[in-house]
Image (cartoon, helix red, strand yellow):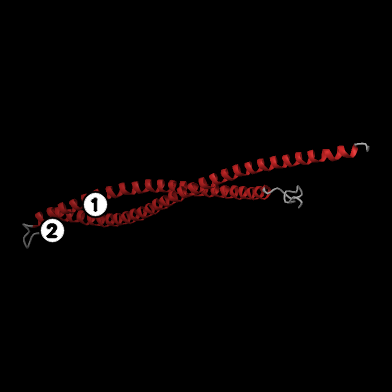
Amino acid sequence: MSSPSSSGSPSRPPPTEASADELRRLNTLLRGRLAHANTELQRVASSRSATADEQHRLSRTLLRQTHELRVLEDLYRARQEEMGRLRAEIAALQEPEGPDTGADPRVVCLESRLRQQEADFRNLEARFDQAVSERDVLQDQSDHLAEEMRLAGDEIKQLQEDRNDLDRARENAEYELLLTETSLARATETLQQAESQSARPVETSGEASPI
């Protein structure tokens, strides 16, 4: 008769040992990836928070700039109306002038006021144009920051999904490792018990007295 196969010899490692080592490596890898994902998520969230603070500051500045523009617009219209009124008064006073009529002091005074108003109006126009330019720059910056926040929000959402997937994979791998190590421990214990039991008859036989 042929002898039984020696494939189950205790000198060979149990088949689950390699699986346990592989699961340990997988757990280490997943923990590393999870730690990296958490770090990256924290970095992006921190960057988005800083961007939100910057946009909030910019929004306050933009609000002040918009208010200043409205004030300048009101002043702009008031100066235009004032210059129109002065021109009308000057025209009305100049109508009855004859060839020998000297300059009316009232006209001279009004013309002086008109020139001052025109100079002030030119300065006001320059201020208004500058304010509009600054407002447009601030609006562009605000729009850019809003887009950055939107993209960061999308990235955070994706990172959270990736992190959750990694966490589930890690939990599954840890559970599989626990089952494998438990099975391996039981198999080792069973093998040791079998070896111990198989050795006892040999020892008893050796101690028996010959007939």
The vertical placement of 130 against 169, above or below, is below
Please tell me which of labels 2 and 1 falls first in the chain: 1
Badge 2: residue crowd in 10 Å (few <14, some 14–19, many ≥20): few
Q: Give the residue at x 55% y 48%.
A: 39
Are dots 2 and 1 in contact, CB under 8 Å? no
**SS at circle 1:** helix
Residue 99's x, y, as percent? Answer: 6, 63
**SS at circle 2:** loop
Residue 101's x, y, as percent? Answer: 8, 59
**Observer-nearest residue: 28 or 122?**
28
Residue 53's x, y, as percent? Answer: 44, 46
**Observer-nearest residue: 206 or 187?**
206
Quadrant position of residue 98 = bottom left
Residue 144's x, y, as percent? Answer: 39, 54
- Reading the image, the residue beneath label 1 is 76
Badge 1: residue crowd in 10 Å (few <14, some 14–19, many ≥20): some
Amino acid type indicated by mark 1: Tyr
- Reading the image, the residue beneath label 2 is 103
What's the distance in space between the residues labelled 2 and 1, CA to CA?
31 Å
Q: Which mark is residue 210?
A: none
The vertical placement of 56 against 132, above or below, is above
Q: Give the residue at x 12% y 54%.
A: 88
Amino acid type indicated by mark 2: Ala
**Quadrant where the C terminus lies?**
top right
> Residue at the bottom extreme?
99
Left or right, 6 with respect to 26, comes to right
